[in-house]
C-alpha cells in the first residue's frame, strides 16, 4: 500500500513541471518516464558541489531535482513542442544539451547533468526550473538528507 501511494505521489509531482525553461513547456506534462536508478540526495549534493554550486544553493537544487525527476537518473519528459528533458534536472535537449556539449546518453549521467544544470543556473538562476517555482516554499526551506 505504501509503495502504491508513493508511486502516485511521484507521478503527481512530475505533473507539476519537468522542464528547465517555461517557454519549452507550459507545465503540463505528457507521459513522463521514470527510469534508471534513484540517486541518493547525498550523491546529488556531491555532484552539485563538484559542478560549482555554493552550499546555500544546493538544498534548493536538490529539491528542484526531487520535483523534476523524482531523483530518477534516467527520467525523461517529452514536451508539447517536441523537445525532451533528460535526467535529474530535466535538461532540455534543444535548449541546453548542445550548449553543455552533452549527448542524450550523457544527460543521464547525474554528475554531467549537474554540470549542465550549473550552466542553466548561471543563465537564469533557480527560477529556471518550473518545479522550483511550483514548490518554492518547500524548496526554500529544504534540507538535504546526507
Image (cartoon, rainbow, N blue to C red):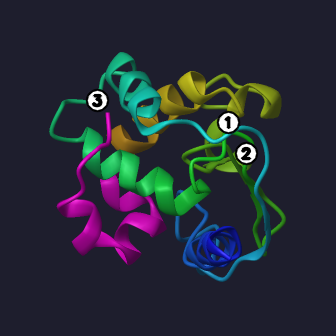
In the rendered view, would you say 129 is above or below 89?
A: below
Tag 1 residue:
97
Which residue is found at the position 60% from the left and 81% from the top?
Answer: 26
Prevailing secondary structure of the magenta residues:
helix
**In the rendered view of the protein, which quadrant contains the C terminus?**
top left
Is 84 colored magenta in this rendering?
A: no
Q: Is residue 30 left or right of residue 92?
A: right
Mark-to-mark CA distance, 1 and 3: 19 Å
> What is the secondary structure assignment of the residue under circle 3?
loop
Q: Label 2 belongs to which residue? A: 93
In magenta, the rendered stretch is 124-146
- The span from disc 3 to disc 2 (Cα, nearest Å) is 22 Å
Q: Is residue 125 visible?
A: no
**Which of the 4 quarters of the picture holds residue 24?**
bottom right
Q: Residue 105: horizontal and vertical position, in percent?
A: 81, 29
The image shows residue 113 at horizontal and vertical percentages of 58, 32
Identify the secondary structure beneath mark 1: helix
Could you say which disc has been placed on residue 53 in the image?
3
Q: In the image, what residue occupies the spot 60% across and 31% down?
A: 99
In the rendered view, does 34 fall on the left or right side of 65?
Answer: right
Rendering coords of residue 67 (x, y %): 50, 63
Mark 3 vs mark 2: in front: 3
Q: Which mark is residue 27?
A: none
Q: Earlier in the sequence, mark 1 or mark 3?
A: 3
Whether residue 73 is situated above or below residue 2 in the rendered picture: above
Q: Is residue 50 above or below residue 11?
A: above
The crowding category of the residue bearing disc 3, from other C-alpha atoms within 10 Å (few below 14, some 14 to 19, many at least 20), is: many
Outermost residue, front direction? 1
Q: Check contact, mark 1 vs mark 2: CB within 8 A.
A: yes
How far is the residue under mark 1 from the one under mark 2?
5 Å
Amino acid at each position: 500500500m505504501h509503495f502504491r501511494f508513493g508511486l502516485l505521489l511521484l507521478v503527481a509531482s512530475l505533473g507539476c513541471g519537468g522542464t528547465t525553461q517555461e517557454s519549452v513547456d507550459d507545465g503540463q506534462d505528457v507521459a513522463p518516464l521514470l527510469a534508471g536508478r534513484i540517486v541518493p540526495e547525498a550523491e546529488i549534493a556531491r555532484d552539485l558541489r563538484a559542478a560549482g554550486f555554493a552550499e546555500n544553493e544546493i538544498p534548493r537544487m536538490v529539491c528542484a531535482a526531487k520535483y523534476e525527476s523524482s531523483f530518477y537518473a534516467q527520467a525523461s519528459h517529452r514536451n508539447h513542442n517536441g523537445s525532451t528533458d533528460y535526467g535529474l534536472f530535466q535538461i532540455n535537449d534543444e535548449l541546453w544539451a548542445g550548449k553543455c556539449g552533452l549527448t542524450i546518453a550523457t544527460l543521464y549521467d547525474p554528475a554531467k547533468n549537474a554540470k549542465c544544470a550549473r550552466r542553466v543556473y548561471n543563465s537564469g538562476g533557480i527560477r529556471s526550473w518550473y518545479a522550483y517555482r511550483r514548490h518554492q516554499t518547500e524548496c526554500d526551506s529544504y534540507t538535504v538528507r546526507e
